[in-house]
Amino acid sequence: MNELQDVPLWIWIVVAICLFLQGNLLFRDARRRGKKAWFWGLWGITGVPTPTVVYLLFVILPESKRRRANRK
């Protein structure tokens, strides 16, 4: 467990800020789109960047394709 003690404090702070921002942004966008906001927000604070990539693939891209198809 000495490896965790060797990590500087500023890295932990940056990681915490990234996780919080990602969770917050995913929650807000999912709430605006009506797509299980709590799920995306909670998952967003567990790791970077997998939840964002999955959100892009399963929420944003299908919705944009649907909008483009309706425009034609």
Image (spheres, rainbow, N blue to C red):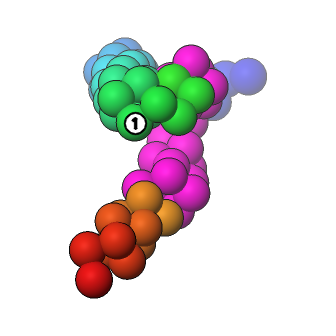
Q: Is 41 or 19 nearer to us in this picture? A: 41
Residue 53 painted magenta: yes
Q: Is residue 52 above or below residue 45?
A: below
Residue farthest to the left? 71
Q: Main secondary structure of the magenta part?
A: helix
Residue 10 on image: x %, y %? 30, 21
Residue 55 painted magenta: yes
- Report the quarter where the C terminus lies: bottom left
- Report the quarter where the N terminus lies: top right
Q: Is residue 52 visible?
A: yes
Question: What residue do we see at 33% from left, 65% from top?
Answer: 67
Question: What residue do we see at 26% from left, 74% from top?
Answer: 71
Question: What residue do we see at 50% from left, 52% from top?
Answer: 59
Q: Tell me: 41 left or right of 20.
A: right
Q: Tell me: 27 left or right of 72.
A: right
Question: What residue do we see at 40% from left, 36% from top?
Answer: 33
Within the image, what quadrant is residue 24 found in?
Answer: top left
Crowding at dot 1, Cα within 10 Å, few <14 / some 14-19 / many 20+, comes out as: few
Q: Is 39 or 45 nearer to us in this picture? A: 39
Label 1, on which residue?
Answer: 33
Residue farthest to the right? 1
Q: Tell me: 53 left or right of 22.
A: right
Q: Is residue 44 above or below residue 58?
A: above
Q: Secondary structure at mark 1?
A: helix
Residue 43 on image: x %, y %? 60, 29
Dot 1 amino acid type? Arg
Residue 31 on image: x %, y %? 41, 25
Q: Is residue 11 visible?
A: no
Q: Is 71 or 3 nearer to us in this picture? A: 71
What is the magenta range? 38-61
